[in-house]
Image (cartoon, rainbow, N blue to C red):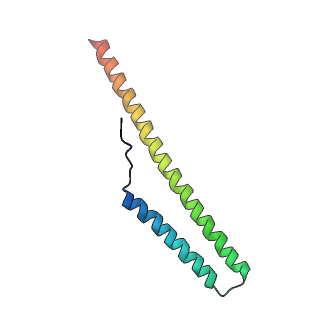
Amino acid sequence: MKKKAYRNTPAFVFLSWGSFAFFVALMLIGLYTLKEPLMVKGYYLMGSVGLISSSFTLSKVIRDNQEDEERYNQMFRANDVLAKKEETDTHI
């Protein structure tokens, strides 16, 4: 039975989530203490939430595209190897 292998260490995962939570808390504290009307606070909050969610989506899209590119390259390398093997087999 194979053991599941993760790309990142548990310490790096903890650091990533910890820094994310820390900066979200700082943003919320900053909005709470801001001396502006509620409408301005809501505008900043909407922008911050939109930026956070779009950064998660963008990182997923970049990762998926990279994995697809690797899979595509592996597929064509395998096809090239098969084509070269068939070419050498027909010349023999």
The C terminus: image quadrant: top left
Examine the rendered structure and indicate whether residue 1 appears above or below residue 57: above
Please tell me which residue lies in front, 79 or 4: 4
The N terminus: image quadrant: top left
Instruction: Left or right? Give the position of 84 relative to 71.
Output: left
Instruction: Left or right? Give the position of 75 relative to 56.
Output: left
> Residue at the location (73% across, 78% down)?
39
> Residue at the location (70% across, 79% down)?
40
Res. 91 image quadrant: top left
Residue extending farthest to the bottom is 35
> Residue at the location (51% across, 73% down)?
23
Q: State the image coordinates of residue 72 (x, y, percent, origin top left).
A: 45, 37
Q: State the image coordinates of residue 35 (x, y, percent, origin top left).
A: 66, 88
> Residue at the location (34% across, 26% down)?
81
Please tell me which residue lies in front, 11 or 75: 11
Q: State the image coordinates of residue 42 (x, y, percent, origin top left).
A: 69, 75
Residue extending farthest to the left is 92
Examine the rendered structure and indicate whether residue 60 appears above or below residue 67: below
Examine the rendered structure and indicate whether residue 12 appears above or below residue 89: below
Figure label count: 0
Please tell me which residue lies in front, 77 or 14: 14
Res. 55 image quadrant: bottom right
Instruction: Left or right? Give the position of 68 relative to 83.
Output: right
